[in-house]
Each structure stands twice: as C-alpha cells, then as structure tokens.
Image: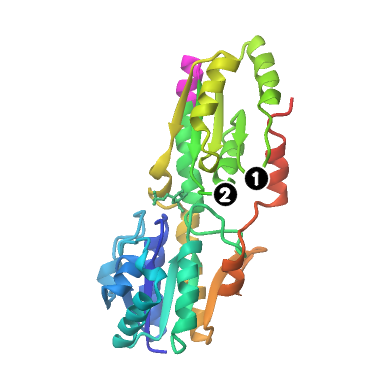
C-alpha cells in the first residue's frame, strides 16, 4: 500500500479538518503518499484528486467544516458513475480510500468496495445525527451539542426575562439523540423526539400547575424529525396561555470551532482508519463503543440504525410526568 486518499461526504461536521491534518501527518509518518479528494463522491467522479501536503493542513485544526469540501452525490448511486470514480482512483494509483461521512456515504463506500476489488476502504463515522449503527460516537456530535447548549442557554436568558415559551428545533434527521441530550443538559421543560411517545395532555396538566405557582417561561426542545415545531408553538399559546416563539436552530448546529473532544476523536479515528488499512482490512468502519475503538464490517454498519442507549431513553421518558 503506497497511495492513500481521503474524502468527506454528506453533511460536514466540526472535527473533519482536524481529521484531515492527522491524515496527512500520519500517512507521511507511515511512508504513504496522501491524496485529497475534493467535494466528496462528486469530486471523485470529476477527478478532483491531488496530492496532499503539510501546507494544505497548516492552521486548519480550529476550523469547523471541511477544507476539502463535501457533497451529497446523486450520480454516485449509478454504477456507471461509480466505475468512472474507480477508474480515477486507479489512474492516481490509489490503493486505499478513507471516507468521512454518515450512513448515505457508507452505502456509497459499500458499493465501491464491492466493485473495486483491489482497493481498500475505511469509514470514519462523521455526522452530528449520531445515528450510525455499531458506534456510540460519531465525529462532530460533541461540537454540535455544545453549539446547541450555547444557543439554549442564551434563549433561556431572554425567555426568563421576557416571560415566554421557546420551542427550539434541533437537527438529527430521523434521530432524536441531539434533541434529547440537549434538552437534558440545558434543563428544558419539554423534550419531544420520535423515539419516545409523548402525551400533550400530561404536559398541559404539569405546565398549568407550574404556571399557577408562578412559572413565567418554558423551554421546549423538539426534534426536527417530528416536523411539529409550529404546532407546539401554537399549543403553548392556546393551551398553556403563554406567548411562544419557534426557533429552528438549523445549520449553526453543524458549524463552529470544534471542541477538544472532537479534535482528539478525529485524531484517533484517522489513526485507526490508517492502521486498519495497513493491516489489510478491505472495507471496515472505525467504530467507538464500550470505551474503545473497534473495526466493524461495512455491511454490518449500513444494515441498521443506531438506537439511543437505554439509560438516555430512561431519562427521556421522565419528561412530561409530574
Ligand atoms: O445529516 C446531518 C444533517 O445536518 C441532519 O441533521 C439534517 O437533517 C440534514 O443534515 C440537513 O441537510 P442539508 O445540509 O442538506 O440541509
């Protein structure tokens, strides 16, 4: 194995740049020639492949996003475009490819690994949604949670001063992890996620009692998956009798200065990805669970969805009860 490449695919996360820095430095340390692929699988199809140098990664560790850009590629779903991508990898004599991305990106990697027998692949779970099967942690989650924490702490200041309800919508696609952890760690009064059934009547009874005792504001965190932010805002106004404001946090959750934890995790993920490839692994994903790093076969990872842990679910179920 001599030439190794990396690409970022799907939604960017903070920590990818730290991963790219480690990728260049550790590849060179191992006597490999590192390559960057711009713009995810789109760039792979369009041959946006070039040798990576130390100067590319100097000064990027503190920046969110990814300096090599990312994309969601429709073309990559078609075998004919993937064949062009494989031809491009071969033209650059690339023997191994590291993919930083989420479940869609890993499905792409799975296809590539089936179609390119002589190239090795390694996946690094990177999505703020934290919904990849086989890993308890995906790169970028800690930074996203901290961004949400800053937002909710600020909203609480104004909510408590002005006497208002705020309905804060957190990202996560189909997964309520970000919303649940954010609600718990910011002391929200309400948390609605798709994994836990909820009863608005129960919340109503509890909130009206609290209001009668003098409570002036409420913070609700709802998962984007439920698509009910507006409805909950109206519910507060009509059923609880308090002015309410919806707040879709949106893409600020994906950006920002990566936390120390994400920078460190990026280093570990990339180190393990390269070690696994050097070890001969054909198509593994580096997973972090039970306190350590493990390699899991791509087929096993793309087959399922990560479930929120029982301990967190237990805390989530306490919401809404008096
Ligand atoms: O998968 C990451 C994510 O940020 C989800 O949480 C969100 O639903 C989606 O991407 C947003 O996608 P886009 O950036 O294409 O709007």
Q: Is the Cβ of the residue at disc 1 closer than 8 Å to that at disc 2? A: yes
Q: What residue is disc 2 on?
A: 175
**Numbered range of the magenta stretch:** 156-164
Return the residue nearer the eye: 242 or 232. Answer: 232
Residue at horizontal 26 percent and vertical 73 percent from the top: 46
Image quadrant of residue 300?
Answer: bottom right
Image quadrant containing the N terminus: bottom left
Return the residue nearer the eye: 207 or 84. Answer: 84
Q: Looking at the picture, how far across and down is residue 255, in whole percent?
A: 38, 49
- The secondary structure type at the circle numbered 2 is loop
Vertical comparison of 109 with 312: above or below: below
Q: Looking at the picture, how far across and down is residue 8, in whole percent?
A: 38, 65
Image quadrant of residue 248?
Answer: top left
- The secondary structure type at the circle numbered 1 is loop
| 163 inside magenta stretch | yes
Q: Is residue 267 visible?
A: no
Q: Is residue 322 visible?
A: yes
Image quadrant of residue 321?
Answer: top right
Residue at horizontal 53 percent and vertical 33 percent from the top: 228
Return the residue nearer the eye: 23 or 300. Answer: 300
Q: What residue is disc 1 on?
A: 195
Q: What secondary structure prevails in the magenta region?
A: helix
Q: How far apart are the alpha carbons under marks 1 and 2?
A: 8 Å
Left or right of residue 281: residue 255: left
Neighbour tally class for label 1: few under 14, some 14-19, many 20 plus, Cα within 10 Å = some
């Amino acid at each position: 194995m001599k030439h190794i490449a990396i690409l970022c695919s799907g939604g960017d996360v903070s920590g990818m740049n730290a991963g790219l820095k480690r990728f260049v430095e550790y590849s060179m340390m191992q006597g490999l020639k590192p390559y960057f692929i711009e713009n995810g699988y789109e760039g792979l199809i369009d041959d946006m492949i070039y040798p990576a140098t130390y100067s590319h990664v100097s000064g990027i560790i503190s920046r969110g996003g990814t300096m090599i850009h990312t994309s969601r590629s429709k073309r990559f779903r078609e075998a004919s475009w993937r064949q062009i991508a494989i031809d491009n990898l071969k033209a650059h004599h690339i023997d191994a490819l590291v993919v930083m991305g989420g479940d869609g990106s890993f499905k792409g990697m799975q296809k590539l690994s089936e179609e390119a027998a002589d190239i090795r692949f390694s996946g690094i779970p990177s999505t703020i949604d934290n919904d990849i099967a086989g890993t308890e942690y995906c790169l970028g989650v800690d930074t996203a949670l901290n961004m949400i924490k800053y937002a909710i702490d600020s909203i609480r200041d104004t909510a408590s001063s002005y006497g208002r309800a705020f309905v804060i919508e957190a990202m996560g696609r189909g997964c309520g992890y970000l919303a649940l952890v954010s609600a718990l760690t910011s002391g929200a009064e309400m948390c609605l996620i798709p994994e836990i059934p909820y009863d608005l009547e129960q919340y109503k009874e509890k909130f009206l009692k609290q209001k009668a005792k003098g409570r002036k504001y409420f913070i609700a965190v709802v998962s984007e998956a439920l698509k009910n932010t507006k409805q909950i805002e109206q519910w507060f106004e009509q059923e609880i009798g308090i002015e309410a404001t919806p707040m879709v946090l949106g893409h600020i959750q994906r950006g920002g200065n990566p936390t120390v934890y994400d920078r460190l995790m990026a280093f570990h993920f990339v180190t393990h990805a390269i070690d696994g490839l050097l070890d001969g692994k054909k198509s593994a994903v580096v997973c972090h669970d039970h306190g350590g790093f493990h390699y899991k076969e791509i087929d096993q990872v793309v087959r399922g969805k990560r479930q929120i842990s029982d301990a967190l679910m237990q805390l989530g179920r306490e919401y809404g009860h008096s």
